[in-house]
Amino acid sequence: MDRHEVRLHLTFPAGAVTRPVLYEVVKEFDVAFNIRRADIQNGTGTMDLALTGTHKQIEDAIKAMTGMGVQVSPIERNVIE
């Protein structure tokens, strides 16, 4: 299996902040994640993470998260890391 890593920015609306979104996608799609940054303010949350899996697993995990109301945006690699 060819595994890849994508960096994503997630925005959680108030209804999804307390839902175990990452647990659900890890369990269902066998992806791995590394949280780079997370914050909750005024009832909404944001998170930057690296998601690892096959292209299909990552694509399915992103579709599932958006279906849960989470906004998912790619993060371009920063030249200075």
Image: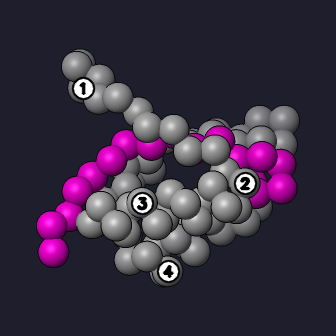
Mark 1 and mark 2: span between their CA atoms?
A: 30 Å
CB contact under 8 Å: marks 4 and 3: no
Q: Is residue 13 left or right of residue 47?
A: right
**Dot 3 amino acid type:** Glu
Residue beneath the point at 37% across and 69% down: 57
As measured in the structure, the alpha-carbon distance from the residue carrying label 1 to the one carrying label 3 is 26 Å
Question: In this picture, which residue range is highlighted in magenta?
Answer: 1-17
Instruction: Determine whether the residue tagged by mark 4 lies in a helix, strand or loop.
Output: helix
Which residue appears farthest toward the left when viewing the image? 2
Does residue 57 show up magenta in the picture? no
Q: Quadrant of residue 8?
A: top left
What's under tag 1, amino acid-wise? Answer: Glu
Assign a secondary structure to mark 1: loop
The residue pinned by badge 4 equals 28
For the residue marked with disc 2, what is the amino acid? Gly
Q: In the rendered structure, which disc, 2 or 4, sits on the residue that comes first in sequence?
A: 4
Labels 2 and 4 touching (C-beta < 8 A): no
Mark 4–mark 1 Cα distance, whole angstroms, equals: 31 Å
Between label 4 and label 3, give the one nearer the viewer.
3
Q: Position of residue 23 (x, y in %)?
A: 55, 72
Along the polypeptide, which appears first: circle 3 or circle 2?
A: 3
Q: Dots 4 and 1: beta carbons under 8 Å?
A: no
